[in-house]
Amino acid sequence: MFDFTPEEWVAIALSIQIALVATAIALPLGIAVAWLLARKDFWGKSLLDGLVHLPLVLPPVVTGYLLLIWFGRNGPIGALLADHLGLVFSFRWTGAALACGVMAFPLLVRAIRLSFEAIDRRLEDAAATLGANPLRSFFTVTLPLALPGIIAGMVLCFAKALGEFGATITFVSNIPGETQTISAAIYTLTQVPGGDAAAMRLVVVAIAISLAALIVSEWFARRAGRRYHGD
């Protein structure tokens, strides 16, 4: 049952690669946006919050189409990046990573934002009285205390990116060896007579990877909680 074909191995490896890249790229921006939403009051905050969470309520196909318009080879951003940096997104695995990152970004931001909001600001004030500037206070106090939420957000982002389908297939299509992820491969196999066994193998792999990610995340979150909160 688990005798994977070379094409299936490629889809599995590509899915993991795309999910990891999407999570790594989304993380710095996710931390910044989460901190901004958790700690600052400014005009347009509700609008920013709405824009961040928009991919959760939009049909994935709509998100993928918008990415195609803006980041496609002839799109305003895509053309600029391709001409000046040689970075092409449309119909490439890099585009799949972008689409997965956009779709998973709200989950990442929400988990980290809740973690920031739970931190006692008096700890940051204490660091300031001891001479720490805001940047040092953030990296030595706020960020370590928010680590469990950051880990949870990263795992949610990875899991969402691993299973993303609608936006990815709309933006970068379903090209074997280039953009065909586990989800796209399962979809293809369900359309082929006799492909049910192979589709089930990939389903089991997707479940196993996601479950392993959740278990590892829980372990790291517990360790971080004991270290920084004394739990």
Image: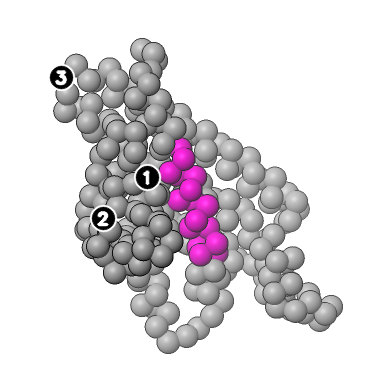
Report the mark closest to the observer, 1 or 3: 1
- Residue located at (22% from left, 31% from top): 188
Q: Is residue 227 left or right of residue 159?
A: right
For residue 193, the mark is: 3
Q: Which residues are magenta?
A: 16-31
Q: Is residue 137 above or below residue 20?
A: below
Compared to residue 172, the image places residue 188 above or below, namely above
- Label 1 and label 3: CA atoms lie apart by 27 Å
Foreground pick, 100 / 39: 100
- Residue beneath disc 2: 64
Q: How many marks?
A: 3
Q: CA distance from mark 3 to mark 2?
A: 28 Å
Looking at the image, which is closer to me, 229 or 194? Answer: 194
Query: Residue flagged by tag 3: what amino acid is it?
Result: Pro
Residue in the picture at 64% in, 44% down: 220
Discs 1, 2 touching: Cβ within 8 Å: no
In terms of sequence position, does the residue under pointer 3 or pointer 2 come before the other? 2
- Residue 62, position as x, y percentages in the image: 22, 58
Rendered position, 80 above or below 15 = below
Q: Which disc, if any, is residue 93?
A: 1
Amino acid at circle 1: Trp
